[in-house]
Amino acid sequence: MRPTTAWQAMAQHPVSFLTSSWPWRSLAYLSGGVVVGAAAVLVFGLGLAAGLALLVVLLGVAPLVGLVLAATVVATVERRRLRLVDLDHLPDPHRAPDAPGLRAWVATRLKEQVTWRELTFTLLSAAALWWLDLLVLGFSFAVPAVLIASVDGETWPWAVFGAIVLLASPYTVTSWAGARAAMARTFLAPRNRELGEELREVRASQSRLLDSFDAERVRIERDLHDGAQQRLVSLGMTLGLLRLETPAGSPQAELLTQAESQLATVHKELRALIRGLNPPVLADHGLVAAIEDYAGRFPIPVTVDLKLPERLPRKLETTMYYLLNEAMTNIAKHSGATTAEVRGRYHSDLLIFDITDDGHGGVDPAAGTGVTGLADRVAALDGRMRVSSPAGGPTLLHVEVPCRFA
């Protein structure tokens, strides 16, 4: 297994570790820590002095607030520096402000717990961590250099000691770099509650997208029905009136026959499109009847075995209809199957659907196929989907979606 931290690299490959980039990355991490820590001491010292001096005239609050917010900058730099010795991504737990502008940004940051953890880390870094970085670097390199440079006939044991310390410096530097990085991650990583809030926002966004798509689908269906379809009907009536004035058997009559035939085909296709956008059978009779109706018009035989206790909530029913519709369409387009089956049950507050076909298989969800869109629909409902599709088939899509009947 490839190591993702300097500590793992040193523990897994203690010999080859010496020729890897990890010791140099650890050295860069500690050297950068000295620079960042010294800068933090300077900025915080000047800011604190200015804030306390101006506090007596009620002007010191702004510098003190600025120091708190400056800690977020130090934390951002530290998260980037951690990539030197820890390849696991450390997300920024700060949330976007509720409104635009500097005032909203400041108010949001001051209310977040992570801001105060970052302030604590910055004060710890300024007060102790950068000194320890400097001490480790000095012990690993400066002390051996002094001992080796001052060698003579009586002090050669110290020179040997200095050489041993220098040879061990990759392990010394990496050990402290790993410990420092673990400490930084403890302060700067998002807490479970913060991650939970972020996940809730993502799920709410997905839900809003589904609602938006549903509303847009209804609008398109209404516009097609009330607009394009009515114009086609009007065009058919115009052609009918024109036929009354056209001599039978004339070239114009033949062209009218062709136009009427094409118009009938377009009208039929438009009705099918409108029925697919918002099928009346779904609104009137529910998911089971709608899937059975769609399966009856499917180009290959489909066995429908859906047993649900009652009508689903409207939003869930509509989403599941289009999910099953899309899954069946993928079977017809890509699988080469001769038969398919849609099976659904409700058990322990879960809707469970299995869509199977006897096609050639080989479906790879990671390859960006139509299965990705299905997975996104399921995820938006807090559900999960698994795919089994060995080469040669059969293919199984297993979908589980939470559902509670009121």
Image (cartoon, grey):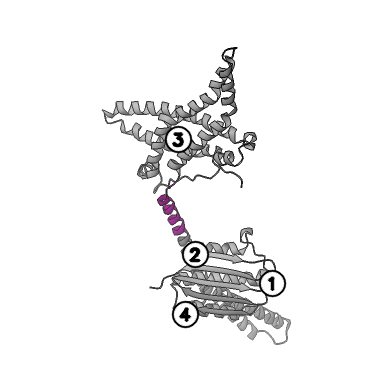
Q: Residue at x 57, y 76 (%)?
A: 342
Depth order, front residue of 262/239: 262
The residue carrying mark 4 is 284
Q: Mark 3 or mark 2, which is nearer the start of the sequence?
A: 3
Residue 31 lies, in percent from the top left, at 53, 29
Residue to which mark 3 is pinned: 74
Is residue 49 shown above or below 243? above
Structural crowding at the residue carrying mark 3, measured as other residues with C-alpha within 10 Å and reported as few (<14), some (14–19) or many (≥20): some
Q: Calculate the distance from the C-alpha at mark 2 to the C-alpha at mark 1.
A: 28 Å
Quadrant where the image shows the C terminus: bottom left
Is-magenta flag for residue 204? yes
Residue 388, how many percent across, how many down? 61, 66
Residue 302 visible: yes
Residue that label 2 marks: 383
Mark 4 surroundings: few (<14), some (14-19) or many (≥20) residues within 10 A = few
Q: Is residue 264 above or below residue 20?
A: below
At label 1, counting other C-alpha atoms closer than 10 Å, the crowd grade (few under 14, some 14-19, many 20 or more) is some
Residue at image coords 37%, 28%? 47
Q: CA distance from mark 2 to mark 3?
A: 39 Å
Q: Reading the chain from its start, which is encountered first: label 2 or label 4?
A: 4
Drawn side of residue 335 relative to residue 66, left or right: right
Q: What residue is at 59 percent from the left and 42 percent from the top? A: 12
> Which of 57/113 is in front?
113
The answer for how far apart the CA atoms under marks 1 and 3 are is: 58 Å
Helix, strand or loop at mark 2: loop
Q: Nearer the viewer, mark 1 or mark 4?
A: 1
Q: CA distance from mark 3 to mark 4?
A: 60 Å
Determine which residue is flagged by label 1: 336
Helix, strand or loop for the magenta stretch, by majority:
helix
